[in-house]
């Protein structure tokens, strides 16, 4: 097993007034040659967006974009004709494919919006762009890790999917819990991001917004503490 530790305090940081951003990987004006990506995971931005503010229309291509609101609501519009609001408890996926433009704004004029914006390299080049969103709260079971985004060939029952052999898991733990995650192949890795609370992985303790990448293993064991919320992304290396 090989590990890469990304403590919360080591992330890139930018404050634009309307946007406060923390970058797990090189992005915008933050550049660290040792933190370009983790396997096919290119971006994990932890954003706080002021009321009524956001990102104007801009293009993407050949990237799988997963947005997870943590609090508040996101107003989305794109060149595919989609327009709507994505709220905390929902997940949005967009396959940019051969090209798409979109805008993302805080839907509230009063409350801040916090979210994870995640980019993964597509395994299918120049595919038709697509968009989907889903309320994942009914899927989540306490004290376990629930897959909420999967590869296309693993999708069933209306599951969210992307063009990549990637699995997104969310966990909410009310009590001390030991979990084993089984990776889907020898070239897969796992990236943990602690949202709240704490976990212990291979004798390493992670707290809020601490992250760790793990690869060169078939399984990953960890212990979650009570009152913990956790995101784990399995990704080809």
Image (spheres, rainbow, N blue to C red):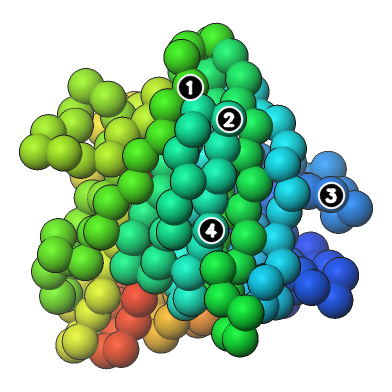
SS label for mark 4 = strand
Q: CA distance from mark 3 to mark 2?
A: 23 Å
Q: What percent of the width, then of the height, locates residue 102?
A: 62, 39
Residue 148 on image: x %, y %: 26, 50
Give the class, few, some or many, for how many residues have Cα within 10 Å of label 1's Cα (few <14, many ≥20): many
Disc 1 versus disc 3: nearer the observer: 1
User: What is the secondary structure assignment of the residue under circle 2?
Assistant: loop
Q: Earlier in the sequence, mark 3 or mark 2?
A: 3
Residue identified by numbered label 3: 28
At a point 30% along the width and 29% down the height, the residue shown is 151
Residues under labels 1 and 3: Cα distance? 24 Å
Q: Which residue is mark 2?
A: 79
Answer whether labels 1 and 2 touch (C-beta < 8 Å). Answer: yes
Name, please, the residue furthest toward the right.
Answer: 29
Mark 2 surroundings within 10 Å by alpha-carbon count, few (fewer than 14), some (14 through 19), many (20 or more): some
Of callouts 1 and 2, the N-terminal one: 2
Circles 1 and 4, Cβ within 8 Å, touching? The answer is: no
The vertical placement of 11 against 183, above or below, is below
Give yes or no for contact between labels 1 and 3 (Cβ–Cβ under 8 Å): no
Residue at position x 41%, y 85% in the image: 197
Is any part of residue 144 visible from this angle?
Answer: yes
Q: How many numbered badges does the structure rendering display?
A: 4
Report which residue position mark 1 lands on.
129
């Amino acid at each position: 097993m090989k590990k890469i530790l990304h403590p919360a305090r080591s992330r890139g940081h930018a404050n634009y007034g309307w946007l406060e951003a923390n970058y797990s990987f090189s992005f915008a004006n933050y550049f660290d040659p040792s933190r370009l990506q983790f396997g096919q995971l290119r971006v994990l931005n932890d954003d706080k967006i002021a009321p009524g503010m956001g990102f104007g229309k801009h293009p993407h291509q050949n990237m799988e974009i997963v947005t997870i609101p943590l609090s508040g609501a996101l107003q989305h519009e794109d060149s595919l004709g989609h327009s709507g609001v994505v709220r905390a408890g929902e997940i949005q996926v967009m396959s940019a494919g051969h090209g798409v433009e979109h805008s993302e704004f805080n839907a509230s004029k009063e409350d801040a919006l916090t979210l994870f914006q995640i980019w993964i390299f597509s395994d299918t080049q120049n595919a038709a762009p697509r968009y989907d969103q889903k309320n994942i709260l009914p899927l989540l079971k306490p004290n376990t890790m629930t897959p909420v985004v999967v590869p296309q060939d693993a999708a069933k029952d209306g599951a969210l999917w992307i063009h990549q052999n990637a699995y997104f898991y969310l966990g909410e733990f009310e009590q001390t819990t030991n979990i084993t995650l089984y990776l889907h192949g020898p070239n897969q890795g796992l990236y943990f991001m602690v949202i709240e609370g704490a976990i212990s992985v291979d004798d390493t303790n992670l707290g809020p917004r601490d992250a760790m990448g793990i690869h060169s293993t078939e399984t990953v064991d960890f212990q979650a503490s009570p009152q913990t919320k956790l995101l784990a992304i399995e990704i080809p290396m």
